Image (cartoon, rainbow, N blue to C red):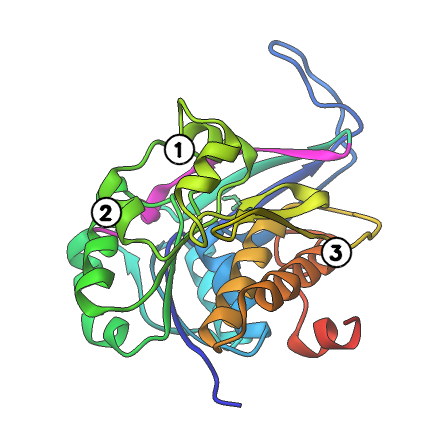
Amino acid sequence: MRKAKIAVIGSSSMDLVVTSEKRPGAGETVLGKAFKTVPGGKGANQAVSASRLGADVYMIGCVGDDHYGKAILANFAQNGVHTDYVEPVTDMESGTAHIILAEGDNSIVVVKGANDHVTPSYVDRAKQLISECDLVMIQQEIPEETVEHTALLCNELQVPLLLNPAPARPISQQIINHAAYITPNEHEAAVLFGGKSKEGALQEFPGKVFITEGASGVRYFDGSKEVLVPSFKVVAIDTTGAGDTFNAAFGTAIAEGKELVQSLTFANRAASLSVTGFGAQGGMPTRDEVERTS
Ligand code: RIB
């Protein structure tokens, strides 16, 4: 089978992860159990995951000129992600995500740092590469105008765009029109489609909007009815990066030409495996691992 060629335009960060029994409230101090630094950032996570799943992946992003930037680049190399379009920004710190794992869930503060330098003109430098891709994947830890610009560019180049609208922010009608696939979770869907019910939003965009519902699965409208493609039961260790794995696997399968339900099932399978390891990328499965459990 021919490898799918995918460009990921997005953030690359270092995740600073504290594990704690209890999440502190405002003004409260608690004693944590452990601290770890691991590679993350929604763009980088999706690039690494798609590469492990067998795609030929090109990252388009920025890192700082600090030691985190070097570690992020080394991690891309280890995972076979092409970094011809990842530049260190002078006098700038890499993006960081400050994560608390407590009470069975995570809470995250992202400081964008160098990821704010992924501008429309920066993306334009990779126009030739993008025109040769089967799919472009993008998220929202980079400037809003870059997402808008990429949607127009992909439309011009006739390359399908998969938008993972995370973290949540309202997006323009242009972006909605030009994206081929949009994959909000329930919270992000509420921000994106403000006044509409979930059912209403799905019905308005059949085969385009896919709402992920965590352990339940993913829901979309097929033109005549709502379809829930169920997830798989696993014992979760860390859910960070499950959404990124879902998107990467969905994008990889679609870019390979797989059918919609088959692609969503593959994505659910990969995402369920991803939560069985620590850190955003720690549990992200290889193609073999997904196929062995299918
Ligand atoms: O989606 C998970 C990612 O979100 C983490 O790796 C962290 O970097 C945050 O941006």
Residue 176 sits in quarter: top left
Counting from the top left corner in percent of width and height, residue 85 is at 30, 69
Of badges 1 and 2, nearer the viewer stands 1
Residue pointed to by mark 2: 148
User: Circle 3 sits on which residue?
Assistant: 277
Q: Are marks 1 and 2 in contact (CB under 8 Å)?
A: no
Report the magenta residues as a range: 104-119
Left/right of residue 176 with respect to residue 201 in the rendered view: left
Task: Left or right? Give the position of 284 relative to 221.
Answer: right
The alpha-carbon separation of the residues under discs 1 and 2 comes to 14 Å
Q: Secondary structure at mark 3?
A: loop
Query: On screen, 155 above or below 18?
Result: below
Picture coordinates of residue 285 (x, y %)? 68, 67
Residue sitting at 79 percent across and 47 percent down?
A: 236
In this orientation, which residue lies closer to the viewer: 230 or 12?
230
Q: Amino acid at mark 1?
A: Leu
- Of residue 242 and residue 253, the one placed in the foreground of this image is 253
